[in-house]
């Protein structure tokens, strides 16, 4: 058996990327102008480029101006998801504008990745290399070069086409080109599927202009006028990028396989719709005034509930609402920074995680409070879900952090079961819907009493993550955020202090500090850090909350994007960009703004 050759470590950090997308999929664009991650045509399709996970074999689309000593900068066109990478040299400068589009043409969706090159000063020689690696880099394409285009075909599926007014050459299962542009010259390159139409220069100009206008018009709908509008708007644009135009579902992250532990094995696939994450996303978007996305997801999740006659939902679903594929390792990929195995699919889909029901019912309640009334059929499905919670809330489960160890009775799961029943009661009362009120109210009261009697540790002086334990958990920060306990209740303040002492490091917050059944230790969880800010603000510790929030804004990358976790140096770990992080930022900004304005007060969701 041939020995597998060693791979050189990747040089591109997770943070050194911007993202573009078309509401079907997303691509990562590195600071050096390389597109090193793209699944095509959907979020959960096999990858076309995955050099982020294997620099040598993953496949990439490189576009490099030859400018000596250039300073490289990346920015978005204002309030859009159109990315501009600039190279500034002493004698010359150039920029590449990257975007993705989706349009209906002859009743079919047509997807395009557009790379617009413009020389802004001097004369610039540029080099291009496009090397798709289909099916998670398991298949190299046959390459055909014609005048002004290169075709890439590998087995069944679409033939990819790269076209533009340059001469391509075939090399090493890819296409290369070198060309020179003078100041003010513009050249467009388009990656799409063969057989679709090729817009002429004028039409392509309109496509680009329309894409910019569409993003800016969407961003302008935001009702947020607070202190951190730039960061909140960027987070909203990221969340919008992660919504599926085709299905109405919301991806937890754009990527798979990016490590939560450097060089370790905590490498998961987040290209699916987690009921929890997506429900929280709906809440964040609704706070900004984006009702359309909230209602689309509410309809999507109502269909999932209707398909579950026993009321039990899956933890996560494929973007189309189907079953998430089985977890599979890709041993041929070297992994980011050598972190292996790279995985696709997710085994956690089969776990019992009772907290998802609370997130779901909270989003449905809010969607009905501020949007369209729930239909009779959808309410019937919701009733089944609530009945399931009433019957199973005492069961041990894997919890929010998807522990791959023995199930445990988790405080957070119990808390969110309380939320599920509480919101269902409130929704039924608000909309005068038929419901077994007496049984549901009894269950809500029993869950509440159980939390106070089983998860308050008098000896430790604070709430604990599991029945009979002493450990803390970052998810406990949700207790005042879902209005289970008052934000200034002495019992909660003691717990908040304990979390601050035991789980935080200068504003960064770990999910937990204990064995979890996996080798290695992960970093701090970004969403927990923003939840901590919100808890501090609600508790009246406004200056501490603001100081922490400003630090977290500094820890974002050059484009105000965030991954799932931070290491001890606040470098990014985990999949990127992460929806849960960005929605937690939005919520923290809202709460902190109100606290600073002196308008923050406890409000129950009546």
Image (cartoon, rainbow, N blue to C red):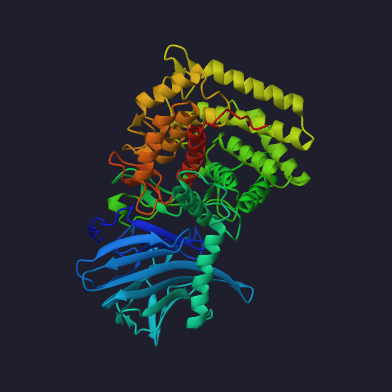
Residue 276, image x, y percentages: 55, 41
Q: Residue at x 50, y 66 (%)?
A: 212
Residue 249, image x, y percentages: 58, 53
- The foreground one among 381 and 79 is 79
In the depicted structure, whether residue 356 falls above or below residue 288: above
> Residue at the top extreme?
459
- The foreground one among 381 and 227 is 227
Q: Position of 68 compared to 522: left or right?
A: left
Q: Position of 283 compared to 426: left or right?
A: left
Quadrant in which the N terminus is drawn? bottom left
- The foreground one among 15 and 36 is 15
Image quarter of residue 333? bottom left
Image quarter of residue 283? top right
Q: Residue at x 34, y 58 (%)?
A: 52
Image quarter of residue 566? top left
Viewer can see residue 123: yes
In the depicted structure, whether residue 184 falls above or below residue 434: below
Residue 359, image x, y percentages: 58, 38
In the depicted structure, whether residue 6 falls above or below residue 179: above
> Residue at the front extreme?
597
Q: Residue at x 50, y 29 (%)?
A: 538
Residue 376, image x, y percentages: 78, 44
Q: Residue at x 28, y 41 (%)?
A: 569
- The foreground one among 213 and 238 is 213
Viewer can see residue 152: no
Quadrant in which the C terminus is drawn? top right
- How many numbered markers are drawn? 0
């Amino acid at each position: 058996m041939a020995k597998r050759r060693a791979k050189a470590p990747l040089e591109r950090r997770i943070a050194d990327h911007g993202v573009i997308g078309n509401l079907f999929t997303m691509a990562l664009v590195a600071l050096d102008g390389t597109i090193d991650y793209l699944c095509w045509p959907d979020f959960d399709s096999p990858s076309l480029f995955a050099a982020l996970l294997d620099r040598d074999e993953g496949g990439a689309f490189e576009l490099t101006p030859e400018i000596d000593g250039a300073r490289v900068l990346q920015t978005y066109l204002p309030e859009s998801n159109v990315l501009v990478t600039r190279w500034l040299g002493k004698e010359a400068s150039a920029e590449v504008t990257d975007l993705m589009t989706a349009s209906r043409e002859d009743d079919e969706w047509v997807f395009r990745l557009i790379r617009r090159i413009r020389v802004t000063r001097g004369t610039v020689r540029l080099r291009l290399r496009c090397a798709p690696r289909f099916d998670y880099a398991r298949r190299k394409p046959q390459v055909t070069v014609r005048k002004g285009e290169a075709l890439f075909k590998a087995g069944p599926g679409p033939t990819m086409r790269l076209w533009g007014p340059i001469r391509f050459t075939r090399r090493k299962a890819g296409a290369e080109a070198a060309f020179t542009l003078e100041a003010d010259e513009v050249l467009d390159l388009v990656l799409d599927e063969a057989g679709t139409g090729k817009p002429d220069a004028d039409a392509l100009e309109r496509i680009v202009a329309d894409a910019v206008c569409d993003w800016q018009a969407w961003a302008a709908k935001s009702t947020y006028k607070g202190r951190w509008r730039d960061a909140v708007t960027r987070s909203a644009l990221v969340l919008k990028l992660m919504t599926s135009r085709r299905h109405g579902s919301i991806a937890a992250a754009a990527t798979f396989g990016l490590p939560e532990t450097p060089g370790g094995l905590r490498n998961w696939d987040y290209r699916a719709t987690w009921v929890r994450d997506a429900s929280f996303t709906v809440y964040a978007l609704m706070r900004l005034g984006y009702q359309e996305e909230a209602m689309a997801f509410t309809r999507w999740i109502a269909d999932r509930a209707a398909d579950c006659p026993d009321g039990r939902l899956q933890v996560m679903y494929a973007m189309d609402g189907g079953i998430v594929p089985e977890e599979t390792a890709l041993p041929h990929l070297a992994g980011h920074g050598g972190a292996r195995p790279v995985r696709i699919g997710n085994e956690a889909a089969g776990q019992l995680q009772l907290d998802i029901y609370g997130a779901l019912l909270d989003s449905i309640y809010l969607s009905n409070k501020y949007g369209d009334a729930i239909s009779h059929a959808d309410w019937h499905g919701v009733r089944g879900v609530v009945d399931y919670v009433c019957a199973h809330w005492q069961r041990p489960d894997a919890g929010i952090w998807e522990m791959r160890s023995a199930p445990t009775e988790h405080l957070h799961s119990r808390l969110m079961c309380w939320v599920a029943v509480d919101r269902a009661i409130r929704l039924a009362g608000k909309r005068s819907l038929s419901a077994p009120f007496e049984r549901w109210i009894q269950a809500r009261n029993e869950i509440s009493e159980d939390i106070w009697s089983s998860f308050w540790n008098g000896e430790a002086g604070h709430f604990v993550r599991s029945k009979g334990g002493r450990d803390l958990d970052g998810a406990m920060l949700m207790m005042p955020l879902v209005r289970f306990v008052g934000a200034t209740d002495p019992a909660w303040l003691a717990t908040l202090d304990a979390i601050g002492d035991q789980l935080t490091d200068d504003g960064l917050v770990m999910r937990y500090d204990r064995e979890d059944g996996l080798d290695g230790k992960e970093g701090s969880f970004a969403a927990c850090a923003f939840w901590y800010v919100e808890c501090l603000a609600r508790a009246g510790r406004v200056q501490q909350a603001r100081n922490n929030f400003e630090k977290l804004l500094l820890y974002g990358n050059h484009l105000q994007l965030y991954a799932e976790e931070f290491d001890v140096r606040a470098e990014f770990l985990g999949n990127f960009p992460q929806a849960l992080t960005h929605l937690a930022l939005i919520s923290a900004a809202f709460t902190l703004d109100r606290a600073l304005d002196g308008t923050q007060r406890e409000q129950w969701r009546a």
